[in-house]
Amino acid sequence: MKKKVIAYNRVEKPVLEDLQQKYDVHYFKNIDTKRDPEFLKQLQTAEGIIGLDLTVDEELLNHAPQLKIVSNNSVGYNNLDIEQLNRRSIMATNTPGILTDTVADTIFGLLIATARRIPELDAYVKSGNWTESLGSDYFGSDVHHKTLGIIGLGRIGDAIAKRAHFGFDMDILYHTRSKKPHAEETYGAKYRSMDQLLMESDFVCLMTPLTPETERHIGKREFQLMKASAIFINGSRGKTIVEQDLIAALQNGEIAAAGLDVFEQEPTDPDNPLLKMKNVVTLPHIGSSTNETELKMSRHAADNLEAGLNGNKPPSLINPEVWK
Ligand code: GLV
């Protein structure tokens, strides 16, 4: 009998089709995972889960007594309760490395789009308003030669620093738990305390994973420390900031603008005040989503899944403590 696998939300079609050849795959998209009767029924006998953004907590695991592996099709894994998975000796995997340059491109694009007001001006031109030469009301601010502060200099933060240093002659400041000699030597990056970074940066780029330590760690006080001309970019998770405080900081002119790939709640509420602000550029959490990278991520997630189902060690195991 084929092993049962639950696929959730994002698994690229060719990869899903390959999995369907080998396993009894049940695909679900955007369902209420706490209540959907078919999903809860299939969970009872599922040995593997693959996909994006499925909340795997104690409640879900209580419905999944046969589960061996949860293969996240993302690098972030804040949707997984690792402690609960460890308790039940269930493997958890992610897709690091593959998406690094793609996300760094997106974040840099967001940064430039925000600084140079590209979406706002695009809408202006397309709506037929461009009838005369424009003045400073429409000008943006420079990116090159400015100071970029990166909070969380992991793989993706490093790739952003590389672009900023070699492409845009920017000064790089960073704040992380441990110092990064590679970035210091290669991009001239300088370590700063969080407060110092916030005070000195023209662009503050948040790239930390969401953990209990980083949850809501940028709020009112942190926005007030930033320059009034600062542009804030969030490429991590919406819950790493206090979104209400970002709204207030923008409304009060405490910072100049924001570029956001992530929101406290996703998809965000259409009434979110951030969506009404001209100085906010938004993306629908799409940092890693190019056709090429998503396909590679799905393949890697499938490799992780298959290894786990077949009793082998998955290449990107998050919780090696369950591997015996
Ligand atoms: C995207 O946000 C990811 O975690 O892969």
Image (spheres, grey):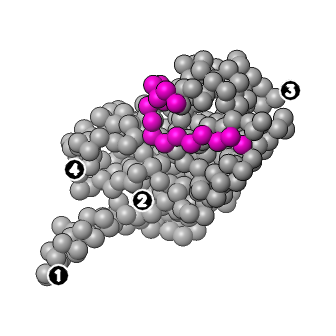
> Residue tagged by mark 1?
133
Q: Is residue 198 above or below residue 101?
A: above
The label nearer to you, 1 versus 2, is 2
Callout 2: 10 Å neighbours few (<14), some, many (20+)?
many
Q: In this view, does 168 lie above or below 269?
A: below
Local secondary structure at mark 2: helix
Pick whichever of labels 2 and 4 is earlier in the sequence: 2
**Given this view, does label 4 or label 1 mark the residue nearer the observer?**
4
Q: Are marks 3 and 2 in contact (CB under 8 Å)?
A: no
Q: In the displayed structure, does residue 184 sit left or right of residue 68?
A: left
Question: Where residue 166 sits in the image (x, y, percent)?
Answer: 58, 68
Task: Choose mark 2 or mark 4, whichever is in front.
Answer: 4
Residue type at numbered disc 2:
Leu
In whole angstroms, how far apart are the C-alphas of marks 3 and 4?
52 Å
What are the residue bounds of the magenta stretch?
A: 23-38
User: Which is nearer the N-term, disc 1 or disc 2?
Assistant: 2
Q: Distance between the residues labelled 1 and 3?
A: 69 Å
Query: Can you tell which quarter of the image residue 67 is in?
Result: top right
The secondary structure type at the circle numbered 1 is loop
| Disc with the residue nearer the chain's start (3 vs 4) | 4
Q: What residue is disc 3 on?
A: 324
Q: Is the CB of the residue bearing disc 3 within 8 angstroms of ligand 1?
A: no
Circle 1 crowding by C-alpha within 10 Å: few under 14, some 14–19, many from 20 = few
Q: Is 319 situated above or below 83?
A: below
Residue at image position (54%, 62%) is: 290
* Precedes in sequence: disc 3 or disc 2: 2
10 Å crowding of disc 3: few (<14), some (14-19), many (20+): few
Viewer-nearest of labels 3 and 4? 3
